[in-house]
Image (cartoon, grey):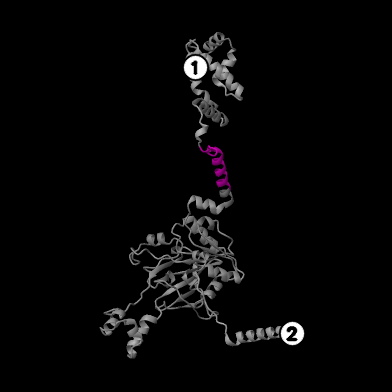
Amino acid sequence: MRRKLPWIIGLLVIVLVVAYYVLTEPVTTVHRVAPDSRILRNPYSAAQEWLAQRGQPSERILSAAALFPLPEPHTTLILDKRRGLLTDNQVQSLLEWVQRGGELIVEARPLPDSREEDSASPEQWRKNDPLLYPLGVTVWDAPTTVTETEKAPFIELLEALPVFAGDPLQYCLFTDNDTLRADCVDLLCKAPEQPAPLLLHAGDDQPLRQIQLYSDHVLWHTSWDEDDSVSYEPEWPVELSAYADNDYGSQLIQLDLGDGQITVLTDLGLWSNPNLHYFDHAWLLAWLTGDKPVWFVRSVAMPPLMQWLWLRAPELGTALVLLLALWLWSRIPRRGPIQPMREENRHDYLQHLHASGYFQWRTNQQEALLEALRQQARARLDRYHHQPEQALQRAARHLKVPARALQQALTQQPETRDQLTQQVMLLQALRSET
């Protein structure tokens, strides 16, 4: 029996393994987790990861201090609409940088809601966007058509249900009325309406591409104006090379300026994390940037001074903070551990005075020890003569001590405990003179 026991155990193990694979099947489950905080803070993290796979380095630029001075023209800059603090010199530098061969991708800045495009003056257009207005680019509200109904679809659906329906949603989805069930599915399950895709026109050598921009505005260039009374000449010699439009108008235009290009979009959300993989958004980013490094510029407003210093020289800022902490540590007075009070270890008042004086001596507070006594001694010294030198000489002769020793007792800091004792004795003798 003992000889058969290992064979029995081995056979049992084989049976269990075979039974496991026969009676079970692998199941794949998906667990949704919150994105990393680094991804949540950077809306273009997916675009940067995709560019890195293509071998294109990319950076996030968070201020004008990090953007200027501008990089070499082989870098592509992507600017969002938060650039209201661009100075005239910075605008001039950006456009000259494009002329030298730079690639600039810009999100258009629409006029504020409080201002109408038809009544806006040229100065207001220029002040709103000093970068694009000299190029002949303006931003207008899209002429969308909204069809209004007398009642909201959900209200009509509730009115169509019987009054006795306990759970309207369950009754709506499981009713025998096919029309009512179809309306329920359209209302509750249909995806929200998306913006109409745009067709990109980039010349005969490029196939038609589709992109989708989430914007309520369209772009207009002065070269499209048929009425000479409303058009104006761009201040920079630009030429339209590509555009993307739908039935409402253009939301992307590309301008040639010197050896470089400027691409204007009404919205940069097509390259955000949720939208990069739709339509030809990734292709458009690759087409515009080629194999160049890419800088995603979040804002060109001047940051606070401390933030600017930290961005420019974090090592210097860290060293200054450490030096300040060490200086405070050396200057702040510290005391030792507090000993618990014992009833049997009480001291008289003279011992307390001695301990207080010894503490001041250890902490280099000799002036505090002698100041009151020196004031009394000086008051007594003034009685000898109205001139300090004569008073000092007379007091020294009266006390039968050298005048230099008395002068040191009145002014000099004692370096040893013996010197302190000698000075106290001289000062007490002078104070006690009658």
Q: Give the residue at x 31% y 80%.
A: 153
Image depth: mark 1 or mark 2 in front: 2
Q: Helix, strand or loop at disc 2? A: loop
Q: How would you rate the neighbour count of disc 2 (Cα within 10 Å): few for under 14, some for 14-19, many for 20 or more? A: few
Residue bearing mark 1: 378
Q: Is residue 153 above or below residue 378?
A: below
Single out the residue that lies furthest toward the right: 3
The front one of 339 and 261 is: 339
Circles 1, 2 touching at the beta carbon (< 8 Å):
no
Q: Is residue 185 above or below residue 255?
A: below
Q: In the shown orientation, is residue 413 left or right of residue 386?
A: right
Q: How would you rate the neighbour count of disc 1 (Cα within 10 Å): few for under 14, some for 14-19, many for 20 or more? A: some
Residue 37 in the image: x percent, y percent? 51, 64
- Sequence-wise, the earlier of marks 1 and 2 is 2
Q: Amino acid at mark 2?
A: Arg
Q: Quadrant of residue 138?
A: bottom left
Q: Specify whether residue 326 is painted magenta.
A: yes
Q: Give the residue at x 49% y 50%.
A: 305
Q: Is residue 350 visible?
A: yes
Q: Which residues are magenta?
A: 319-340
Q: Is residue 217 above or below residue 399?
A: below
Q: Is residue 397 above or below residue 281?
A: above
Q: Amino acid at mark 1?
A: Arg
- Quadrant containing the N terminus is bottom right
Q: Quadrant of residue 72?
A: bottom right
Q: Give the residue at x 51% y 25%.
A: 350
Residue bearing mark 2: 3
Q: Specify whether residue 363 is painted magenta.
A: no
